Image (tube, rainbow, N blue to C red):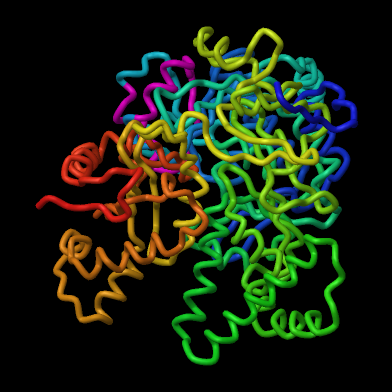
Amino acid sequence: MLTSTRRPDPRPAPGTLTQLFFEAVEHFDKPNALQYKAGGTYRPISHRDVLRRVRHVGLGLKSLGVGPGDRVAILSENRPEWAIADFACLTSAVTDVPLYPSLPAEQLAFPLIDAGVVAIFVSTPAQAAKLAAIRARVPCLRTVITFAGTRVDGADLTLTELEARGAAADSDAVAATYRREALTVRPDDVATIIYTSGTTGEPKGVMLTHDNIFSNVAASQKIVPHGGDDVCLSFLPLSHIFERMGGHYLMFSVGTSICYAESVETLIDDFGVVRPTIVFSVPRIYEKILSGATERARAAGGLTWRIFSWARAVGEEWVTAQEAGRTPDAWLAARYAVASRLVFAKIRARIGNRLHHFVSGGAPLAVEVNRFFRAAGLLILEGYGLTETSPVITVNTPDENRIGTVGKPIAGIEVAIADDGEVLTRGPHVMLGYYNKPDATHAAIDDEGWFHTGDIGEIVDGYLRITDRKKDLIVTAGGKNIAPQPIENIVRQNRYVSHAVMIGDRRRFPAILIVPNFAQLEAWAAYKHIPVTDRAALIHHPDVVAKMEREVLGDLHGLANFETPKKVVLLEHDFSIERGELTPTLKVKRRVVDAHYKDIIDHLYATTDYTAEYAGVPKHHD
């Protein structure tokens, strides 16, 4: 190993999520532990009501014959019932299996069968219908419980009915016994099995123990700022470990009121209503906020666009001074004050004017996006981790924050860089293993306890910087290594680009697949009076192709010749979760994209004459 780093802080004492739950309820006892939207307004649920409902659901599961060690799935969007079902499973010593609500029916069968799920909570009639379509193939599944108010097709009973069963068995003595038995759960018991959406291959069930997640929460409590009156807006899928640890367990453990967004479509409205102080998000959301602000200013044109562009440039100067540890001079401070009042204040207002920090994870955050938010007075604490690491390995903090890195390790965690550049980590956060996959577990965790992340990175002054995925590295036919993610991140910032995927492994030269932002591209085509009847015609029009080549390649500066894409290929359809091209957290599955567009890729290389060492412009054979 070349380099390693860790914090001097001792690792947190082992603990359980049941311990976390009871301690938070008893310590905070607030009227608004959880909040949900109904009739356009947010309504609170107190800690006491959460405790009561969790116990009733737990007792209800027991009445169905569900006991310690059994697996129960949750297929639902973010809502209070998700949290209640989860805590009910944990306090009943049941292992829960969260499933992405965006998954189609066909992709649900494998984890249900593999984990041997005996019962499942579903949110809506649409989710129940998915279960009905595959239930005959899942013989282990005995009970489907819906969050809907009445029984729906595909469900055996409602959550209300299940709670009524538990309420009928409840009493003061039963409540005391329930709590006592719940606290006998051990730190090394499996709390959850999370099936990785996987950018490659078959999903694997990650077994996380109570202490895996508890240790992550305890360490994060010390470095992620929080106060007694904080409000968190929860919208990332709770089935993903990032939101589940951060927006669910961490926020609950520090008494932060958790508000569930109505949907991603209503997110901006929910920001305005909730006015959160803490938000956990993925880079795609930050990119959309930035592109939305940019497009509004561009559409207004004239003075508005000039002011926006000027303010962004001033913000860059301001952030550069901060990063260098300099106090901005009076002239810069005066200009920044004007830029903040005219532009940045409006962005802060759109997200409620109370936010003191974002936490970013799930994928790399472009430096340009992070710097814009910093200029706008919105701090992003970028971190890094995986499902297998519960998830946080490193994170930037307000006091130790270096843009372009993913921060320093949290307490109790070691990070090292192997000889081939792979990031390794060791500590209480590392999973127990992959369910039913001992060989895959052994391949991921070596004999010294180091988990091999599959990411390539480096450590500078104790900060970790991720450069790419080990398996995503492109090795051209000429033996050149290309890290695609940094290039894709740059290209995705362009307003005409929705998705970008570099290709070129074992090929003569690199190219890039582009899913255009069709709203922007179609508007440009209309402005240029380009006659197109559909998207297929649009992406093949010579003027459109030339435009997109200028946009994509014009954004790439400072790359070596062998790294620079030599062809830009436009795709007619956006990537989707349903077709398996995107994970539920919107990361591209490269192997699936390669397979789906194999004919287009093969045709590209078969019809392009290019010698990477000598040529500057590809030649085409029609």
Using the image, determine if residue 103 lies above or below residue 69.
below
Q: Is residue 575 above or below residue 580?
A: below
In the picture, measured across the screen, residue 120 lies left or right of residue 192, that is left
Q: Residue at x 51, y 62 (%)?
A: 288
The extreme bottom residue here reads 303
Q: Residue furthest front?
A: 614
* Nearest to the observer: residue 361 or residue 115: 361
Q: Residue at x 50, y 56 (%)?
A: 490
- Foreground of the two, 284 or 4: 4
Whether residue 131 appears in magenta in the rendering, the answer is yes
Residue 72, compared with residue 505, is above or below; it is above
Badge count: 0
Residue located at (58% from left, 54% from top): 366
Q: In the rendered structure, which segment of residues is drawn in magenta? A: 107-135
Question: Seen in the image, is 538 located left or right of residue 446?
Answer: left
Q: Position of residue 456 (x, y in %)?
A: 59, 33
Q: Residue furthest left?
A: 622
Q: Provide residue 43's location: percent of width, then percent of height.
A: 65, 58
Tell me if I can see residue 140 in this picture: yes
Q: Is residue 75 above or below residue 545?
A: above
Q: Position of residue 122 (x, y in %)?
A: 47, 36
Tell whether 219 sits left or right of 500: right
SS majority, magenta:
helix
Mark yes or no: residue 167 visible. Answer: no
| Left or right: residue 297 compared with residue 590 | right
Q: Nearer the viewer, residue 424 or 584?
A: 424
* 448 within the magenta span: no
